[in-house]
Image (cartoon, rainbow, N blue to C red):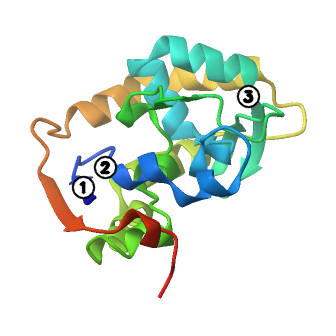
Amino acid sequence: MLAEFKIINHPLRPNVCTNLCSVCYRDKKKESNRIGCCSYEPELCLFDLLFLYLHYPSIYEFVLKKGRIIKGYNGIMIEMKTGLNRCPFISDTGCVLPRDAMTPLCRLYICREAAIWGPSIIEEKFNEYFSSKEFQLNNFLNSKLTYDKGFTRIKLNSFIEKFAPAIKAMIAEIDTTNPPVEIFNKEIVVKDFGILP
């Protein structure tokens, strides 16, 4: 099989993806649905929510309605806790979300078992998130939010609506046209996928 790794160097919402997910070795170990890493229930940070509000309002409304507000690793977040032990956006053909609507973890994480077949910069791309414009904007939003036990979806929505014009103006200044794309290929034997050296 020709393993492909694609790095989309979008200045605001970068992506790292591989076709190895379609032959995930984890799926062979389970009787359940073929979902690999998507057994993770995603957590959307404030910037993710605001980005969805601006660009994908129906997804934003779904997340706000179905998610649970938490204080997570990236500040105030919405956890898509479905009780299914899987992402609510997974289908038989993969994620139904547009790539730029995914959380940073979903856009930038490649498991170690797949990453060993790709270029060494994959891990660097994940770590770059913590110095990115996206991360800075999320920290800015968290600095403006007062979170307490009585914090509700209504308060969160009001906060998002209040800061949407300012964030929209900030991201409008970022040139996102034709982001550079890097593609790496390597021939692998599928049965070796999942075996760490």
The disc, 2 or 1, on the residue closer to the chain's N-terminal end is: 1
Q: CA distance from mark 2 to mark 1?
A: 8 Å
Q: Residue furthest top?
A: 58
Q: What is the three-letter code of the residue carrying label 3?
A: Gly
- Depth order, front residue of 145/5: 5
Single out the mark in the foreground, 1 or 3.
Answer: 1
The disc, 2 or 3, on the residue closer to the chain's N-terminal end is: 2
Q: Which residue is mark 1?
A: 7
Which residue is pictured at 24% across the width and 48% down the height? 11
Q: Residues within 10 Å of mark 2 (few under 14, many from 20)?
A: many
Q: Residues within 10 Å of mark 1 (few under 14, many from 20)?
A: many
Which secondary structure, mark 1?
Answer: strand
Q: What is the three-letter code of the residue carrying label 1?
A: Ile
Q: Which residue is mark 3?
A: 67
- Depth order, front residue of 130/18: 18
Q: Which residue is mark 2?
A: 14
Which secondary structure, mark 3?
Answer: loop
Which secondary structure, mark 2?
Answer: loop
Q: Please, is residue 63 above or below residue 135 in the view?
A: above
- Depth order, front residue of 89/36: 36
Which residue is pictured at 64% across the width and 23% down the height? 63
Q: CA distance from mark 2 to mark 3?
A: 24 Å
